[in-house]
Image: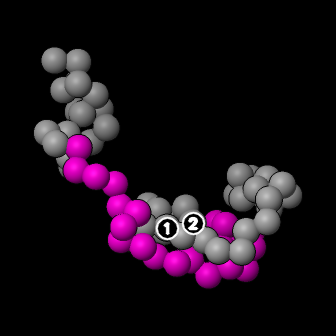
Amino acid sequence: MAVASFIKEHYIISRLYASTLTRAKQTAQYLSDAFGTEIILEEDLMEFNNGLLAGLPFEEARKNIRK
């Protein structure tokens, strides 16, 4: 992935943390592959409950914000 390549060129990563959400793990995997660094999974990095919008698809949540 291009972003992982850019980050590798400009930064040094010795530790890589991600939440246990699938999308976070998948994103972190690109950096893990680029740097050869293990992903440290942390439940404390999970996002907070966003109330009535929790679990809604993005477009549905967006409609509800406007109300």
- Residue identifier under label 2: 28
Q: Residue at x 23, y 44 (%)?
A: 50
| 53 to the left or right of 23 | left
Foreground residue among 39 and 1: 39
Identify the magenta region: 30-50
- Residue 18 numbered tag: 1
Q: Amino acid at mark 1?
A: Ala
The vertical placement of 15 against 23, above or below, is below
Seen from this angle, which residue lies furthest front?
A: 44
Q: Secondary structure at mark 1?
A: strand
Q: Picture coordinates of residue 38 (x, y %)?
A: 62, 81
Q: Where is residue 37, by image quadrant?
A: bottom right
Please report the residue visible at 71 percent of the width from the left and 74 percent of the height from the top. 14
How would you rate the neighbour count of disc 1 (Cα within 10 Å): few for under 14, some for 14-19, many for 20 or more?
A: many
Colour mapping used in the image: one colour
Query: Relative to 13, is 17 on the left or the right?
Result: left
Q: Are discs 1 and 2 less than 8 Å apart at CB?
A: yes
Left or right: 14 in relation to 16: right
Q: Could you say where residue 3 lies in the image, as x and y percent from the top left?
A: 71, 52
Residue at image position (72%, 59%) is 4
Q: Circle 2 sits in a helix, a strand or a loop, which is it?
A: helix
